[in-house]
Image (cartoon, rainbow, N blue to C red):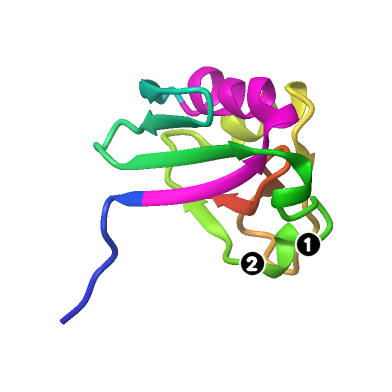
């Protein structure tokens, strides 16, 4: 039997670092548990870790390519309120046929939905 683990790694162009950090810390209430010049690990309330490697733009998928990769889901206490916070922070909404969930794209990163 297999199941998902509690660690996830993303690669994002370093120019998006301040906005990515804000999404994780200000909106998703994650804490920064480790930081170096090229890596920040954000720890979510349930103990899951999202490691974001910040690289030169040429080494990262561009924002148009990111939606072709894996999509994420973040479980939040109030998806509507979190969606409002993301929109207020300028995070791009992604149109999707599933209208039961809100979809967004992390600045310079993958698409995720709120549930």
**Is 59 contained in the magenta span?**
no
33 over 10 or under it: above or below: above
Q: Main secondary structure of the magenta part?
A: helix
Whether residue 23 appears in this view of the structure is yes
Q: Is residue 23 magenta?
A: yes
Residue at x 52% of width, y 28% of height:
24
Q: How far is the residue under mark 1 from the one under mark 2? A: 8 Å
Q: Which residue is mark 2?
A: 69
Q: Residue at x 26, y 37 (%)?
A: 46
Do residues under tags 1 and 2 come within 8 Å of each other at their CB atoms? yes
The residue labelled by disc 1 is 65
Label disc, if present, on residue 3 of the rendered structure: none
Residue 88's image quarter?
top right
Residue 18: image location, x then y, percent: 66, 20
If the image is split into quadrants, where does the N terminus sit?
Answer: bottom left
38 over 22 or under it: above or below: below
- The part of the chain drawn in magenta is 8-28
Mark 2 Cα shell of 10 Å, populated few (<14), some (14-19), many (≥20):
few
Q: In terms of depth relative to the viewer, which is nearer, 82 or 35?
A: 35
């Amino acid at each position: 039997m297999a199941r998902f683990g509690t660690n996830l790694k993303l690669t994002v162009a370093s120019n998006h670092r301040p906005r990515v950090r804000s999404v994780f810390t200000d909106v998703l209430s994650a804490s920064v548990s480790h930081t170096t010049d090229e890596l920040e690990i954000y720890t979510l309330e349930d103990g899951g870790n999202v490691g974001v490697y910040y690289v030169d733009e040429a080494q990262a998928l561009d924002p148009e390519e990111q939606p072709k990769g894996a999509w994420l889901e973040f479980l939040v206490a109030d998806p509507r309120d979190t969606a409002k916070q993301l929109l207020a922070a300028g995070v791009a909404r992604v149109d999707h046929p599933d209208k039961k969930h809100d979809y967004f794209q992390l600045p310079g990163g993958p698409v995720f939905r709120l549930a």
